[in-house]
Amino acid sequence: MRKIFLLALICTVIAGADAKAQEVTYVEDPSQGVTLNRFKDNWFVTGEIGVGGLGSSYDGELDFGKRLMPSFNVGVGKWFSPLIGVRFSADFRKMKGATIDGAGIDPVNPTDGAVGNYLVNRQWSIGAAADVYLNLTNWWCGYKPDRVYNASIYGGVAAHSQMIKKMDGNDAKWRHHGMSIGLRAGLLNSFRVSNHVDILLDIRLDADQCNYMDMTRQVNLYGSVMAGVAYKFNKTTWSAPIVPVCPEYKYTDAEGDALVERLKAADAKIADLERQLRECMNRPVPEPVAPAKEAPLATIYFPIGSSRVQGVQTKVVAAVANAMSGTDDEYVVTGWADSYTGSAARNQQLREQRADNVVKLLVKNGVDGGRLEAATADSSLSGFGENSADLDRAATIEIKK
């Protein structure tokens, strides 16, 4: 058991010395949580380009490939936390589908691209949208500032102006045809390039309720896939609690050899201590020596620097007074003090005060003061040295010879 204790002590000292030589650094640890940034941080702008196609009413009569048209958008947004963000965007999209009425038909060549009884509807949609984002990756896997891929779902509302070709005299020109208000949802895939740049892959579905100027209504479904880029402003990461990091210390061969030698020396020291302990335990126990003088009737102990009888010592004095009441003996009360603390003058004062206070307390408990004598002693009461100085701070009561 002692060997294990000494080994543990040596290892603690060595580890403490090594720790002083290492430099402790402090870093943000996102695994401990995040704190919200300032309002001016975590803003971003986006630009996207891709293709989309109508999927409502009679659009299925037209081949899917022929319905794919270009789509563009630009936006500005902000993340309020690693999970929640918003984006406001402007959309520009060309749409092509099948219809049986005249809206959106090329007025110059109305049968261009017709399929059976279905004509081709062509229109531009220009509008604005507001979306709320939820970062699924940070939600499920925890926030990591250097994660390469993040997936976010979003939903929002959009308003668009529908533009179709109409005759203006002898010319066909794009004119406003109606408004659409709708909902949309999507999945935004972000690929981190740097702290400020992300590559985007945006998959979206819009559902618009169209109100045309000719008082007709219909619901358009528009799906799109777009690629783009996001640029992030100011601080792009999130603050996290600061934690200390101790670098891993690598011992060299020389240091390892020195440590082995120190352990060998410790083993030798432990073996020597065990030998000494065995020798000590095998020594014969000396016979007790009778005290050179008769023990006092009672000894009253005092705290260091104090001459007041207190606590259980008052009960000792009361018991001694009760014993004295049955005799006619005279008694000497001797005051003692240690010679290891305080000045000689102060120690002499304590001796006198301790003897006087015990005499007063004996008289208070019924002992005739004429039978009591106060005295002091300059020598040590216990004789056990400085480590037993508490035993020298006392007053003794003895029968007067």
Image (spheres, helix red, strand yellow):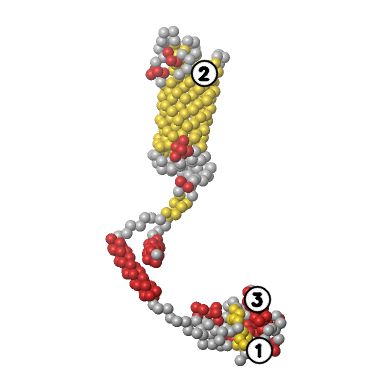
Which kind of residue does numbered mark 1 sit on? Glu
Say whether disc 2 or disc 1 marks the residue closer to the N-terminus: 2
Q: Position of residue 161 (x, y in %)?
A: 52, 22
Tell me how far mark 1 sits from mark 3, CA to CA: 21 Å
Snapshot quadrant of residue 212: top right
In the shown orientation, is residue 27 left or right of residue 39?
left
Depth check, mark 2 against mark 1: the one in front is: 1
Asked whether residue 106 appears in the rendered view, the answer is no
- Residue identified by numbered label 3: 315
Which kind of residue does numbered mark 3 sit on? Lys
Asked whether residue 7 appears in the rendered view, the answer is yes
- Residue identified by numbered label 1: 330
Give the SS element for disc 2: strand
Snapshot quadrant of residue 318: bottom right
Q: Position of residue 263 (x, y in %)?
A: 33, 65
Q: Which mark is residue 219?
A: 2
In the shown orientation, is residue 325 left or right of residue 43?
right
**Residue drawn at (49%, 45%), measured in percent from left and top?**
34
Tell me how far mark 2 sits from mark 3, CA to CA: 102 Å
Within-10-Å neighbours for mark 3: few <14, some 14–19, many 20+: few
Which kind of residue does numbered mark 2 sit on? Val
Q: Which is nearer the eye, 308 or 162?
A: 308
Q: Which is nearer the eye, 116 or 71?
A: 116
Q: Position of residue 328 (x, y in %)?
A: 68, 88
Depth check, mark 2 against mark 3: the one in front is: 3
Within-10-Å neighbours for mark 2: few <14, some 14–19, many 20+: some
Q: Which mark is residue 71?
A: none
In the shown orientation, is residue 27 left or right of residue 330?
left
Say whether disc 1 or disc 3 marks the residue closer to the N-terminus: 3
Quarter that holds the N terminus: bottom left
Give the SS element for disc 1: loop
Q: Is residue 270 above or below residue 239?
A: below
